[in-house]
Amino acid sequence: MISKNPENLEKVLNYESFTTLEIALDLLQNTSTSELNVYGEQIDEIWENFKKLFRIIEAAGGIVNKPNGDTLFIRRLGKWDLPKGKMEKGESREESAIREIEEETNLQNVELRDFINTTYHIYTERNGDRVLKHTHWFEMFFDGEDTSKPQLEEGITEVAWKNTTQIENEVFPNTFQNIKLIIKEFWDLKSK
């Protein structure tokens, strides 16, 4: 997290230079530290320098719901996830979200509704490259013949529709923090 104020934070680094960010990333990658907060007055500078540590990948995906309210999930690498993927050159965020959902789940005629938000997450590729993935999330709707099946060549082993109770009891304990955050944000938007 990048913040102006270090209030109530246990693991913090005061931003002084680009080196501060290199130290923070080293701590996250090479110690048992799982969360670290960098703070300073120059938020824009901190963010721009942070991004320089990574190869940036733009992606798009969606929270796909059926008329009964069930939500579509994929299972990849043993974790529940939402369908999403890298944007192709010249493709809009909306086009990418629809294409990725159709490719990863085999559903056709998914309807794009509203933009929800964006998330960021970092990972290291097999070749050692550090990646900052910037994912654009959309609300989607599906009311057709369920032809869902996993895209095995992408490591997806299951496609499943989950209701709210299943999401809370099955998905949330076995998913990524960003997935929990975007789903909860979506639920909050829909409850207003």
Image: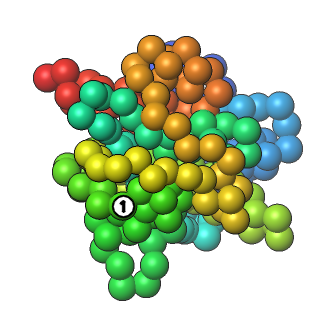
Find numbered disc 1 in the image and state the secondary structure of the residue it sits on: loop
x and y percentages locating residue 17 in the rendered image:
60, 56
Of 89 and 149, nearer the camera is 149
| Residue 160, above or below 171 | below
Of 48 and 116, nearer the camera is 116
x and y percentages locating residue 69 in the rendered image:
29, 28
Residue 45 at least partly seen = no
State the residue position of label 1: 108
Q: Classify residue 173 by image quadrant.
A: top right
Could you tell me which residue is drawn at 30 percent across and 56 percent down?
A: 110
Q: Is residue 175 left or right of residue 61?
A: right
Could you tell me which residue is drawn at 56 percent across and 33 percent down?
A: 177
| Residue 117, above or below 166 | below
Of 111 and 19, nearer the camera is 111
| Residue 49, above or below 10 | below
Could you tell me which residue is drawn at 35 percent across and 50 percent down?
A: 145
Q: Is residue 21 left or right of residue 63?
A: right
Q: Amino acid at mark 1?
A: Gln
Residue 68 at least partly seen = yes
Q: Residue furthest left?
A: 192
Quadrant occupied by the C terminus: top left
Q: Is residue 73 left or right of residue 164?
A: right
Q: Residue furthest bottom?
A: 90
Dot 1: within a 10 Å radius of its alpha carbon, few (fewer than 14), some, or many (20 or more) residues?
some
Could you tell me which residue is drawn at 19 percent across and 51 percent down?
A: 113
